[in-house]
Image (spheres, rainbow, N blue to C red):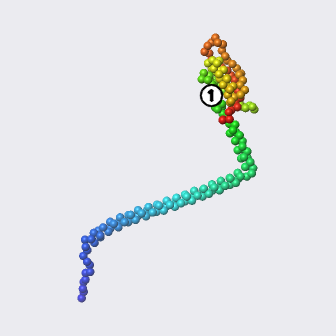
Amino acid sequence: MKVSLNLATVASPRERYALVWAAPLALIGAAVFVFLSYVGVESFLEYHKITKNLNDMTQQEHELQDREAALRKELDQPRDRQVFQKAKYVNSLIDRKKMTLTQVTLKVAELMPSTVRLASMGLSSQKEGPLVHFAVVGQSEDDLETFLGSLEDSPNFTGLAISNQGFQPSTSPGAPVSISCTARYVGDGSD
């Protein structure tokens, strides 16, 4: 005798909905898994790339430190140390004696009245110190005498010598007068 037995139960509505949504949720889950796997692999490759760059930079830094140490060792040799000390001494002397034509021109301009102008200026170096040659033009003899007096009284200049005078006779009033002179620049210690 054959007995047929049906052990299946009737599916509830909840079970039917679960069965319908299982396939789409499985696809969404698989897509999220693929996306997270892709991001993970990209992050892993980027991490290895950054690690390699960091190792290269660290190695380059060590090489540069080794080169610096070798150069310092070479520069610390007694003969090189003496050369550097002498060069440093000479540079300090140069810094103390440094003078520019612009500085001298400013010193001369401070001594000039407003009616006198500097026509030309030159600077020559001599054993006793720099010698300044200049030509000035003024509106009157009194203006130039005021300038010469200021130049003689200045602590920056000594040994004033007039080399050429261009005073016009008083028959032509208003004509400019000129003078050429030299003076030794001694500075005032603030240069």
Quadrant of the drawing holding the C terminus: top right
| Residue beneath the point at 68% across and 26% down | 153
User: Which one is in front, 6 or 18?
Assistant: 18
Residue 80 image point, x, y percent: 73, 49
User: Which one is in front, 70 or 94?
Assistant: 94
Q: Is residue 3 above or below residue 26?
A: below
Give left or right: position of 13 versus 121. left
Q: Is residue 95 above or below residue 116?
A: below
| Residue beneath the point at 68% across and 30% down | 156
Residue 160 image point, x, y percent: 71, 25
Quadrant of the drawing holding the N terminus: bottom left
| Residue beneath the point at 64% across and 29% down | 107
Question: Dot 1 corresponds to which residue?
Answer: 110
**Residue 117 picture quarter:** top right
| Residue beneath the point at 65% across and 56% down | 66
Q: Is residue 26 above or below residue 88?
A: below
- Please name the amino acid that badge 1 sits on: Glu
Residue 29 image point, x, y percent: 37, 66
Q: Secondary structure at mark 1?
A: helix
The crowd level at tag 1 (other Cα within 10 Å; few <14, some 14-19, many 20+) is few
**Residue 25 picture quarter:** bottom left
- Seen from this angle, which residue lies furthest bottom? 1
Tally the numbered discs: 1
Residue 152 image point, x, y percent: 69, 25
